[in-house]
Structure formats: C-alpha cells, structure tokens
Amino acid sequence: MSCRDVRAMFSEYLDGELAPAHARFLARHLESCAACRAEFDALRCALEMMAALPRESSPDPIATRVRERLELEARKPAVRHLLRPGRPLLRPRFAPVAVAAFCLMALPILMVPVRPTVPAPAGALGFGSESRPLSLSSDVLAPRLTQSASLDDALAGAPADRSWFVETVVTRDGRVSAVRVLGGDAAYAAPLADALRQERFEPGRFQGRPVAVSLYRLISRTEVRAPST
Amino acid sequence: MAAGEFAIATVETLGAASAERSLLEQCRGGDAAAFARLVALHETMVFNLALRMLGNPDEARDVSQDVFLQVYRTLGRFEERSSLRTWIYRIVVNLCRNRRRLWMRRRRDRSVGLEDLSARDESRLAQGGDSPYDTVRRREQAERVQRALLALSFDHRAVLVLREVEGLTCEEIAHSLGIAEGTVKSRLARARDALRARLCAPEATR
C-alpha cells in the first residue's frame, strides 16, 4: 500500500470508521513514515483549530427579530397566505395574544447569561466538553443528581400551577456550568437559575468517559415523574 | 413528597427526543410560547452555522431570522423522518447557499465582514485568566480558520462545519444536505484535506 493510499484513509481513521486491520496498518505506517505522520498531524491540527472556533451570539437577539417579523406579518393581510391553510401555527385573530405570550417567554432567555466558551481539550475535537455539551441519547448515560438544590426560597410566592422549562449544562466533573430558563414565569427565572447552579451530579458518560451534558427539565411544584428506564 | 414542595421532573423523562416531540406538538397546536422556546433552543446553533458559512455576523443574523420564519411557516410539513435539528440545519444551509448566489451575482467581496467577525470573536475569546497575548493569539487563529473556510467551495465548507463544528454524524449530514451518506464521507475527506492544505500544511506551520 502506497503513502497515497494511506493518506486517503486518514479521514475515516480520525472518525474511527476504518476496519480494525486497516487501522492497525495505518498506525504502524505512521510510526515508520515521517512524511505521512507530518501530514496526519497537520490534518489533526487543522480539525482541532476548527473545533476550537468560539461559539458566537447574534448581535441582536434573534427571537426578538423573529417575533417582530411575525407581528408585522400578522398585520399585513397580503402575507397571510404564507401561513399554511388548514393547520396554521398562528391564527391571525389570535396573533396579538400569541405575540404577547412570545414576548413573555423570550424575556427570561434574554436575562440568562450565554453559555461560557471553554477551549476544546487537547487531542479531541471538543464534543462533550463544556462548550459543546452532548444531549441525552441512547449512547449518552445521563448525569445522576447527587446534591439537589433547594428551590423553596427561589420560587417562594410562585403560584402552584407554574412550571419552568430549563436547560442545565452538567460539566465533566459534575458541576453546573450554565443554566438557561427557556420557558416559564420570567419573574422567577433569575433566582431559579441561581438555585439550580448549586446542584451537583455524577457526570454523564459517553463510551465510559465523563462528558458535559445538556439536560432539559420541567420544574413544577407538584409533579414528580418516575424515571422511564 | 409533601404538597407545596417543589420537585424536579427526572431527567430521563425529558431526554432531548421526548422534549423535542412535546415542543413540536405544542408549536403545531399554535402555541406561540412553545415556538419562542424552539427559537431559544436552536438560535445559537443556527446563528453559528450561518456565521461560519457566510463569515459575516450581520448576514448570519439576517439568515437566522429567515430560517426561523421558514421553520414557522413550514413546521406543519415537517414529517419527522429526521430530527428537528437536522431539518433546521438543512434550511440554514439552503438559505446560506441562496445568499451566497446572490452575493456572487452582485460580485460581492468574499472577505467582507471578517473584520467585524474578528472584533466580535475577540470579546468571546477573552476568557478568564487569559493574557492579552493569549487573546490575540486565539483571535488570530479564529480569523485564520474562518478565512480558510471561506476559501473552500460552499459544499466543502458545509460538510466541514456540520461535522467539525456542529458535531453531526455522517448520516445526519446526509439528511441535512440531501445527499447520500457515501457522498458525505468522500466529500468530507476532500474537504478536510483542503482545509489542512490551507491551515496546517507542514511548511505553513514552521
């Protein structure tokens, strides 16, 4: 197998998709061929630089711009045909109420700080790090709560029927690096986020190693759901 | 649990898939607050993908707005053959491609906006404990990567950003770009090699 053939396998090798026999051959070749090793290191360097690109936020909140456009369109009869007939998302006669609700729900999102950026760990592409947390799936073992937060003070005075939709980023060492209140009564978003930052977890795991995980949870006064597993 | 005590629903009941399904049902039922949540969940991802594809924060913001308007208008036709995220990625890529064609027709300078981008990057890159030197070095590296990306073809850039920045699997990229998975793998290999040649060729790293 020539160096050219070996280099053609780099991409699959990095993705772990090369057949074991080919992967072993490639690893041995890299030990003995300085030119291929330099090219492989350069490729990995380029991909790590790309994975380290910072996560950006829009100059203006996009949710606000979308809401304003929808509001504008709701006022213009000429664009009503754009809403799908039969099963529209927003019926024109409900538009003012819906837009008001949209504003209410967008408020806590704007109040919560953006997720901090952390450089990708050396030698990895950064997935499962705090800046690129994984979502739960069949491959990702969910973090287990080891120290719960006391929410009674944070939510004191909240009506019993209130609930909040919250994203929590659990780090690789079980701490909480970010909390975003995505929905619910905006008046309680900040104290709720502060309280939830005190939670501690047994970290989530992917292929046996600790990873940062985004959890999506509903918080309510009365409802407790049993684990589905 | 005593009445009146706050409780947290267990995380297993709200895994990403079930949370997404519930959100979709609410959006389709005309719940504007649910649509606001959908925007909040995906806006960072949409903006960043558009930013890396176009290299200009203002253009990326405009495309992001158009993406969610299109999502809003066509959510009823989303058949859930792929995840919502993958479907949204597809819309982002298509709208960025349209925007790019418009630029080409107007002969717009490809590098426009990079200065804006680097200025914004600087504030995000200045992390706690970093020296000014580290901040400048990170900014310069981000600029280099973005320039290298913009020098690639649109198709190569799309497959690279979806894979290396957004972390999609080849199957998800195939859904997002509407191409075969085998094509994704071969295109990804060529795109990675093109990026390497521009960023980290051995002679360039000396």
Image (cartoon, coloured by chain):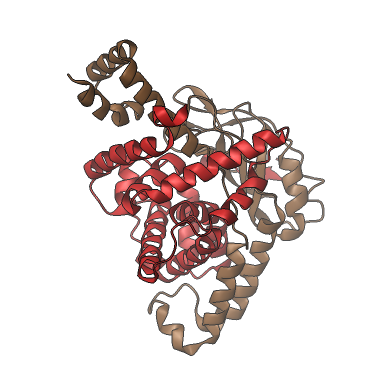
Chain colours: A brown, B red
- Relative height, residue A102 to residue A171 (above, below): below
Q: In which quarter of the image is residue A203?
A: top right
- Residue A160 horizontal side relative to residue A132, left or right: right
Residue drawn at 59 percent across, 35 percent down: A130
Q: How many marks?
A: 0
Relative to A63, does residue B52 appear above or below in the rendering?
A: above
Question: Is residue B123 rendered to the left or right of residue B85?
Answer: right
Residue B31 placement (x, y as % from top left) = 54, 68
Q: Residue at x 22, y 26 (%)?
A: A4
Q: Which residue is drawn at 45% across and 84% down?
A: A79
Residue A184 visible to an observer of this rendering: no
Q: Is A6 on the left-hand or right-hand side of B20?
A: left
Task: Locate the N terminus of chain B by quadrant.
Answer: top right
Which residue is at the far left? A1
Q: Which residue is drawn at 65% across and 69% down?
A: A103
Residue A119 at x, y = what percent? Answer: 58, 34
A87 relative to A207, above or below: below
Q: Which of B108 and A211 is in front in this view?
A: B108
**Where is residue A160, by image quadrant?**
bottom right
Q: In this view, does A154 lie to the left or right of B43?
A: right
Asked if B110 appears above or below A94 in the picture, the reply is above
The image shows residue A164 at horizontal and vertical percentages of: 65, 53
Judge by depth and name the residue closer to the eye, B193 or A110. Answer: B193
Residue B110's spot in the image, x, y percent?
43, 58
Q: Do we see residue B201 in this rendering?
A: yes
